[in-house]
């Protein structure tokens, strides 16, 4: 199983999206092996753009801070087992586990990518295409991530953008196309995950603030992600936490974390709600430069 698959696949399997479904029965096998995966599910209508920000307060090797997740993929920051840091953007193509078993016309296809982005396929818990961009992100810095959707007949082209602080500009990382039946973005969420899972990793706290989240609808309306449901995976440990901290959501798991804020399945609400103003200067939907032809990944 790849490092990037557990978070989204586990999240979907547990039914913890914003539909308010119950969390799966506790799995005692996960206790003291890994930090519990914790999520924020954002209720919002179908959209063509999903924007979110993250500020990581505490990390450890084997961490995934997933910033922009939806029902067909996810986009976030990882610290690998060797301490290397990167961004990962992945898109699902089916519910099978063997990436080679998916028919070519049903696979996720690469439309375009930045020259510094690596791509490949994954399997184990669903299949799809994934991409990696090496970037030495810093604890305490705020990062801006964006996903856009463009429907093309029965497929949708999902693009990942990253605002590079050093150049003060948006970088288009990759565009993948996958079979959706003509749907845009939906099922928005974020999470923190420990994928090292070696026992020691469970003793290391991971903390981040998620902020200024927005969805733009097909009609062009901007919807503030001013509410979020706090959920967790089937790991039964309770050293997890979520809270509203000013205009940001706080999410934490592992180590000496105490559940002093929201309880599981509780809905958090930002104080200013719909009075918030959307960010300006975002990339336009479908504006990615095409540097490769459409072809199946892998």
Image: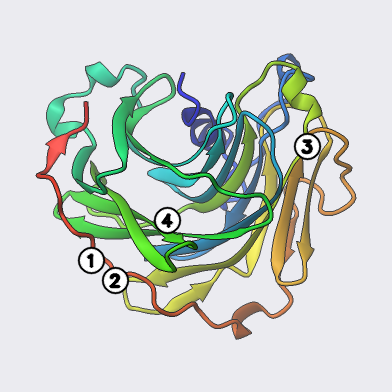
Q: In the figure, 245 relative to 63: above or below?
A: below
Residue 114 placement, left or right of 66: left
**Residue 74 location, x and y as percent?**
44, 44
Query: Which is nearer the eye, 58 or 95?
Result: 58
Give how far apart the Cα atoms at labels 4 and 3 are: 30 Å
Q: Which residue is mark 4?
A: 186
Secondary-structure class at tag 4: loop
Give how far apart the Cα atoms at labels 1 and 4 are: 20 Å
Mark 2 or mark 4: whose residue is earlier in sequence: 4
**Residue 69 location, x and y as percent?**
48, 49
Point out the frontmost of discs 2 and 4.
2
Mark 1 or mark 4: whose residue is earlier in sequence: 4
Mark 4 or mark 3: whose residue is earlier in sequence: 4
Q: Which residue is mark 2?
A: 284
Q: In the figure, 197 relative to 146: above or below?
A: above
Q: Quadrant of residue 268?
A: bottom right
Residue 205, numbered circle: 3
**Residue 68 location, x and y as percent?**
49, 52
Secondary-structure class at tag 2: loop
Residue 94 visible at all: no
Secondary-structure class at tag 1: loop
Point out the frontmost of discs 1 and 4.
1
Mark 3 or mark 1: whose residue is earlier in sequence: 3
Name the residue: 53% across, 31% down: 13
Query: Which is nearer the eye, 182 or 255?
Result: 255
Q: Quadrant of residue 239?
A: top right
Q: Residues within 10 Å of mark 4 (few under 14, many from 20)?
A: many
Q: Which residue is mark 1?
A: 287
Q: Residues within 10 Å of mark 2 (few under 14, many from 20)?
A: few
Query: Which is nearer the eye, 27 or 36?
Result: 36
């Amino acid at each position: 199983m790849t490092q990037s698959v557990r978070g989204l696949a586990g999240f979907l399997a547990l039914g913890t999206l914003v539909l308010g479904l119950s969390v799966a029965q506790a799995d005692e096998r996960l206790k003291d092996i890994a930090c519990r995966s914790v999520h924020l599910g954002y209720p919002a209508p179908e959209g063509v753009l999903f924007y979110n920000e993250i500020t990581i307060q505490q990390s450890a090797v084997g961490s995934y801070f997933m910033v922009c997740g939806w029902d067909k993929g996810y986009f976030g920051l990882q610290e690998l087992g060797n301490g290397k840091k990167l961004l990962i953007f992945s898109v699902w193509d089916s519910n099978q586990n063997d990436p080679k078993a998916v028919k070519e016309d049903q696979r996720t296809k690469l439309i375009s990518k930045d020259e510094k982005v690596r791509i490949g396929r994954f399997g184990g818990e669903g299949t799809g295409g994934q991409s990696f961009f090496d970037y030495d992100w810093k604890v305490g810095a705020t990062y801006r991530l964006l996903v856009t959707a463009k429907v093309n007949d029965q497929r949708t082209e999902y693009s990942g953008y990253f605002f590079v602080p050093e150049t003060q500009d948006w970088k288009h990382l990759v565009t993948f196309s996958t079979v959706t039946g003509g749907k845009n973005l939906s099922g928005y969420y974020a999470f923190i995950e420990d994928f090292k899972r070696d026992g020691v990793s469970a003793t290391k706290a991971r903390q981040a603030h998620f902020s200024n989240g927005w969805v733009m609808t097909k009609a062009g309306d901007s919807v503030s992600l001013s509410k979020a449901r706090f959920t967790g995976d089937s790991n039964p440990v309770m050293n997890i936490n979520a809270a509203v901290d000013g205009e940001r959501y706080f999410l934490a798991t592992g180590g000496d974390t105490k559940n002093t804020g929201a309880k599981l399945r509780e809905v958090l609400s930002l104080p200013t709600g719909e009075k918030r103003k959307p960010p300006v200067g975002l990339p336009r939907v479908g504006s990615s430069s095409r540097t490769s032809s459409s072809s199946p990944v892998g």
